[in-house]
Image (cartoon, helix red, strand yellow):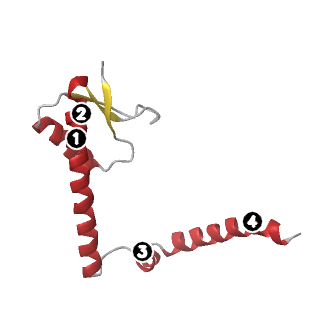
């Protein structure tokens, strides 16, 4: 019977490709399910052979730790170079969207808090 190995919902394409490549390199047979036509099914990677589940999980854990460190290092490098996204760069790139979201946040806060001050 098949066993769920790795969910693909909200996973970047490069990470999904790297996971597929990792499993293929270690000769672990898997198959992939998509989100379906309406996007409500679970996209995931599944193992054919349950006996290799622990081996595959160990590989994925090591990969995810390595990827986490790599992404942190890249982000720190962007910060050092002054190219990391910040609120100011977000405002510069999308001022209308930034202002609209700020107003929406203020409205939600006002509606949430105003009832406490009316007593």
Looking at the image, which residue sits at the far top? Answer: 1
Where is mark 1, residue-wise?
58
Tag 1 and tag 2, C-beta contact below 8 Å: yes
| Label 1 – label 2 distance at C-alpha | 6 Å
Where is mark 4, residue-wise?
111
Residue 64: image x %, image y %?
A: 26, 50
Where is mark 2, residue-wise?
54
Image quadrant where residue 24 sits: top left
| Label 2 – label 3 distance at C-alpha | 45 Å
Earlier along the polypeptide chain: callout 1 or callout 4? 1
Looking at the image, which residue sits at the far right? Answer: 119
SS at mark 4? Answer: helix
| Label 2 – label 4 distance at C-alpha | 50 Å
Tag 1 and tag 4, C-beta contact below 8 Å: no
Side of 105 where 89 appears, left or right: left
Where is mark 3, residue-wise?
93
SS at mark 2? Answer: helix
Tag 3 and tag 4, C-beta contact below 8 Å: no
Dot 1, crowdedness within 10 Å: few (<14), some or many (≥20)?
few
Residue 83 vertical position relative to residue 12 in the rendered view, above or below: below
Earlier along the polypeptide chain: callout 3 or callout 4? 3
Earlier along the polypeptide chain: callout 3 or callout 1? 1
User: 7 or 41: which is nearer to us?
Assistant: 7
Residue 2: image x %, image y %?
A: 30, 22
| Label 1 – label 4 distance at C-alpha | 48 Å
């Amino acid at each position: 019977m098949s066993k769920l190995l790795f969910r693909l919902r909200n996973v970047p394409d490069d990470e999904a490709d790297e996971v597929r490549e990792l499993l293929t390199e270690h000769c672990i047979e898997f198959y992939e399910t998509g989100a379906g036509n309406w996007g409500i099914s679970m996209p995931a990677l599944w193992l054919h052979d349950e006996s290799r589940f622990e081996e595959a999980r160990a590989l994925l854990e090591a990969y995810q730790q390595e990827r986490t460190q790599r992404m942190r290092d890249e982000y720190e490098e962007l910060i050092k170079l002054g190219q990391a996204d910040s609120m100011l760069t977000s405002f510069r790139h999308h001022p209308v969207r930034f202002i609209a979201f700020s107003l929406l946040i203020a409205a939600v806060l006002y509606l949430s808090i105003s009832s406490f001050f009316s007593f």
